[in-house]
Image: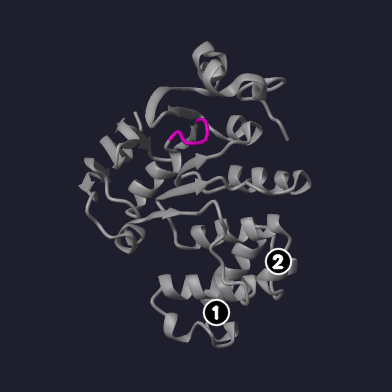
Amino acid sequence: MSATVLQTHGLIKRFGGITATDNVSIGFELGARHALIGPNGAGKTTLINQLTGVLAPTEGRVVMGGQDITDMAPNKRVALGLVRTFQINQLFSSLTPLQSLALVVSSRTGKAGGWWRPLGQDAAVAAECEQLLDQFRLAEHADRPTRELPYGKRRLLEIGLAVALKPKVLLLDEPAAGVPAAERQDILDTVAALPADVSVVLIEHDMDLVFSFATRITVLVNGAVLTEGTPQQIGADPQVRAVYLGDSMAGIRPGADHG
């Protein structure tokens, strides 16, 4: 059985009289391909915010690699290998993809003071950036200001910047949100090709992406875990269909290639 790398124990988050997460206990295994799905307002992003330290839980614990990180600052969680992307891009619009990646790689390797120098001066940084540009289909856009990139490419850059931090657990918050249909295949293929030893937790409403990517799915409704299982189990669950999937499952065979 795989080791559990990230786990929540009875997470509760209240905002006044609203319970946004309600006694959520989930474990994410080493190398997981785990999706969190549920209706809008189900508590998915609130849960991610508690995992990453943006929000402190009202009750409960977050444990990573056997260490209680419930009260740990977000930047210290990143240093442990817990990295996320956001629903809305958090990018440097005036920098190019190459400069953005150089900044992150240099920061991670302790060379941030000189990230702005010509990349050729540090062969290791240059080589890693080149590899990341290829991996995330950005090579031809390497020197273009980020603000000029197609939206799908900006999404890919954000995932690339997260991977450049060498995460152990990568949390992807709706990576396909707002991406035109013609560009979604790049997102799907890139997410599918993420390193096998990285545990990936995906929040997404695009069921094509969810069911082609995930080997485990947790369904959240009203802040609580409704059920959890394989894509086949979730796709066939009448309760899940009733409260969330409905017609969105039409024509989708869980586990099939929807590319």
Q: In the rendered view, does 176 fall on the left or right side of 81?
A: right
Secondary element under disc 1, as helix, strand or loop, is: helix
Q: Which residue position holds label 2?
A: 139
Residue type at mark 1 is Ala
Residue 56 — which label? Answer: none
- Front one among 244 and 101: 244
**Residue with the most extreme right position:** 182
Quadrant location, the N terminus: top left
Front in this rendered view, residue 35 or 46: 46
Left or right: 222, with 210 as reference point? left
Residue most toward the front?
A: 17
Is 3 on the left-hand or right-hand side of 144? left
User: Residue drawn 36% across and 59% down?
Assistant: 78
Q: Which contiguous range is marked in magenta?
A: 38-42
Would you say 201 lies left or right of 78 here?
Answer: right
217 up-or-down from 30: above or below: above
Figure check: 53 above or below 250: below
Inspect the magenta stretch and tell me whether residue 40 lies in it. yes
**In the picture, which quadrant includes the C terminus?**
top right
Tell me which label, 2 or 1, sits earlier in the chain. 1
| Within-10-Å neighbours for mark 1: few <14, some 14–19, many 20+ | few
Tag 2: residue type? Ala
Q: Badge 2: few (under 14), some or many (20 or more) residues near its Cα, within 10 Å?
A: some
Q: Which mark is residue 123?
A: 1
The answer to which of 108 and 209 lies nearer the viewer is 209
Mark 2 vs mark 1: in front: 2
Using the image, determine if residue 71 lies above or below residue 37. below
Residue at 51% over, 18% down:
240
